[in-house]
Image (spheres, rainbow, N blue to C red):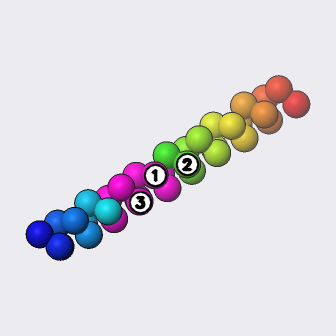
Amino acid sequence: MISSQISSLIHGAILTLWINASTDLLCSSYSNQFN
């Protein structure tokens, strides 16, 4: 039980970091286009 909770937490953290990185890349590319 504990290992499954830890693995789900790790997956959630990786997914959050990946979404944040993708959003940062999209925002920077959009700002570069409009500048």
Placement of the N terminus among the 4 image quadrants: bottom left
* Bounds of the magenta segment: 10-18
Q: Which residue is mark 3?
A: 13
Q: Amino acid at mark 3?
A: Ala
Percent coordinates x, y for residue 10 in the rendering: 33, 65
Q: Which of marks 3 and 2 precedes in the sequence?
A: 3
**Image vertical order of residue 22 relative to residue 6, above or below:** above
* Among the 4 quarters of the image, the one containing residue 31: top right
SS at circle 1: helix
Proximity of marks 1 and 2: CB atoms separated by less than 8 Å: yes
Q: Amino acid at mark 2?
A: Asn
**Image vertical order of residue 29 relative to residue 7, above or below:** above
SS at circle 3: helix
Label 2 packing within 10 angstroms: few (<14), some (14-19), many (20+): few
Q: Which residue is mark 1?
A: 16
Q: Amino acid at mark 1?
A: Thr
On residue 20, which mark appears? 2
Placement of the C terminus among the 4 image quadrants: top right
Proximity of marks 1 and 3: CB atoms separated by less than 8 Å: yes
Calculate the distance from the C-alpha at mark 1 to the C-alpha at mark 3.
Answer: 5 Å
Percent coordinates x, y for residue 24 in the rendering: 64, 45
SS at circle 2: helix
- On whether residue 16 falls in the magenta region, the answer is yes
9 or 23, which is in the foreground?
A: 9
**Image vertical order of residue 3 relative to residue 27, above or below:** below
Instruction: Using residue 13 as the reference point, say whether residue 20 is left or right of it.
Output: right
Label 1 packing within 10 angstroms: few (<14), some (14-19), many (20+): few
* Among the 4 quarters of the image, the one containing residue 6: bottom left
| Main secondary-structure element of the magenta-colored stretch | helix
32 or 2, which is in the foreground?
A: 2
6 or 20, which is in the foreground?
A: 6
